[in-house]
Image: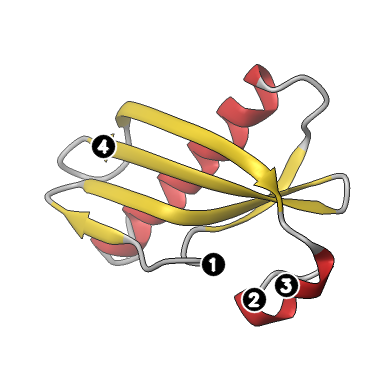
Amino acid sequence: MLRVDPATRVEQRCNARAMGVVGREQQGMRPDELVAYAFADTQQKDGAISAPGAAIRSAGRWYHLSYRCHTGADGMDVTDFTYVLGAEVPKQDWSEHSLVP
């Protein structure tokens, strides 16, 4: 993980945290994919990422997701994470937003 550039590392760590937290906190959710930029660009600064237009897939369905995540200086440890899980994304919108079945 330390071989990837810092911005990619932060996004990957935070995406993994999002999938883990959603899977633990949302009954019936078993996330297996996440697209941080599906509905809006991510914003990064100083080891923090904001993904206001993310999407997360569980059981073959995509859902809107927004998250904010902070990591340590090396981008490896998540120090703060908050999210809001939204409504299901209609299947007809998937291809327009890089969401695969």
Q: Which mark is residue 73?
A: none
Q: How far apart are the alpha carbons under marks 4 and 3? A: 30 Å
Residue 67 vs residue 15: left or right? left
Residue highlighted by disc 1: 38
Q: Position of residue 6 (x, y in %)?
A: 25, 59
- Tell me which label, 4 or 2, sits earlier in the chain: 4
Q: How far apart are the alpha carbons under marks 1 and 2? A: 6 Å
Residue highlighted by disc 4: 70
Q: Amino acid at mark 2?
A: Ser
Cβ atoms under marks 1 and 2 closer than 8 Å: yes
Q: How far apart are the alpha carbons under marks 1 and 3? A: 10 Å
Residue highlighted by disc 3: 93
- Tell me which label, 4 or 1, sits earlier in the chain: 1
- Tell me which label, 4 or 3, sits earlier in the chain: 4
Closer to the camera in the image, 92 or 46: 92
Q: Give residue 76's quadrant in the image.
A: top left
- Judge whether 54 appears above or below 93 on screen: above
Q: Amino acid at mark 3?
A: Asp
